[in-house]
Amino acid sequence: MGTFAKNTLQRRQFLKIMSATASSGLGLGTLASLSAAAQSAPDYKALVCLFMFGGNDGNNLLVPMDTTRYAKYAQIRSNLALSRDALLPIQPANTGGLPYGLHPAMGGLQGLFAQGKAALLANVGPLAVPTSKAQWEARSVPLPDNLFSHSDQQAQWQSSIVDQSARSGWGARIMEHQLPAATTNRGYGVISVAGGNLWETGDGSLAAYKVSSSGNFGLDFYQPNGTDPLSLAIGQTLLEPRSHVLEHAWTDVVTRSLDNQRVLTQALASTTLSTIFPDTGLGRQLRMVARLIAAHSQLGLPRQCFFASMGGFDTHGSDQLQQQNELLGEVSAAVNAFYAATTELGLARQVTLFSASDFGRTCQSNGQGSDHGWGNHHFVVGGDVKGGQLYGSFPNLSLNGPDDVGNGKWLPTTSVDQLGATLGAWFGAGAALNDIFPQLVHFPPDLGFMA
């Protein structure tokens, strides 16, 4: 390859990388504006979405332990049933004395539940309107599109839009109401440590600012006054004369991205966190979220939302029990450390983490693992959570019963809109909730699990 061709190729590759990085600068302030905003927001709150991709089998996350219902659970689950003695007992304060058990790997969540810092939500899923088994069978009410599909149900959980393709997520829609377009550093209101996601996708000026769990922002090697070849190349590229308006815009966005990177790097360097996180993928993600929350005063934002995730929950096969044991163990340890970190920072009441997933799974075994379902059990963790309680209606646990739409696919009795609206009200978006959640008018808006 000739020198000219080689240099042209390198330049194109460099510009491609710069363009990808520049997209993260949308809606972010300059270095000067970021520094000027370095003051603690008086009413700061953060919302953290932990998405479990693949469809976590909530039937083994939360299990009834009274004799009658455990027997029904064990019969339906067959080879997937957990031993009653292995379950971690919890006693929700609002179930009339009915005991439950958590998955044996969820010791961290068990402790938080006992402390009143975690709540459990039963049988949550996407719904267009409240739906009965008879209405499902007759198709006499609107139903969510493409049920039991990974991509569609991920989108419906993250967007709370069930009847059309979604272009925005409910996390971003909440932030659009909480942070007007003119807010300084608005782009830092939505940060992902797990790449792109619909939950944090908003209007054209608000999209997730992506940060790796290691804290690298993409162009860490660049030094404004550096004499190394890469720093010089970036500096020369940004100083080149531009004749087209789009070229000027590109230069401005890249410059802001570099400024933003330096500010976040400086802000993170000034934070200290003694809480020990597990050295796992999710542990590293939530540690970065905790560090970013610790640095919130540098940005002066009153509200932020964060997105973290794990994959591997699509458990159709014979290794489901072992696979889920490892996955939920990672979740429990990381979430427990995250709550400890918010306590260390003095922000436990200002930060709430909630779980989400594509869908639940069939309670009935397919002979090896479990298949795609609908309603699922989830948890919420934080200092402002009214913990130690179980919210929503636990399924009947009868095949072909009032909650079963096939093989133990539980018909949700609580909608994603209700979950999101309860969190949104705590976040301060009460007046806009019906705009943010299109189907909320059909449901009681507050599940009661937030202070």
Image: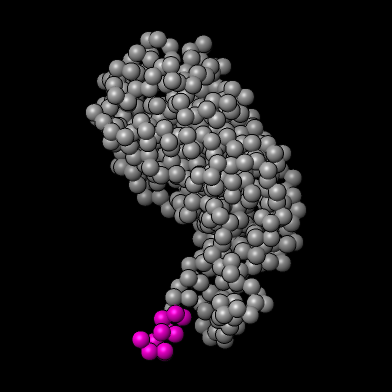
Write the residue at 64% across / 32% down.
384
- In the image: residue 25, left or right of residue 327: right
In the image, 231 versus 116, the foreground residue is 231
Q: For residue 244: magenta? A: no
Q: Is the magenta stretch mostly helix, strand or loop?
A: helix
What coloring was used for the rendering?
one colour
Q: Position of residue 365 (x, y in %)?
A: 27, 27
In the image, 239 versus 222, the foreground residue is 222
Write the residue at 28% across / 36% down.
317
Write the residue at 60% across / 52% down.
189
Q: For residue 7: magenta? A: yes
- Relative to residue 257, is residue 324 depicted above or below? above
Q: Where is residue 418 in the image (x, y as percent from the top left)?
A: 49, 33
Q: Where is residue 157 in the image (x, y as percent from the top left)?
A: 43, 41
- Relative to residue 304, is residue 444 depicted above or below? above
**Res 150 → quadrant:** top left
Quarter of the image that includes the C terminus: top right
The span picked out in magenta is: 1-11
Q: Position of residue 436 (x, y in %)?
A: 51, 44
Kindly tell me whether residue 122 is visible in this rendering. no
Write the residue at 58% across / 42% down.
277
- Relative to residue 426, is residue 396 depicted above or below? above
Kindly tell me whether residue 451 is visible in this rendering. yes
- In the image: residue 254, left or right of residue 319: right
- In the image: residue 135, left or right of residue 328: left
Quarter of the image that includes the N terminus: bottom left
In the image, 294 versus 191, the foreground residue is 294
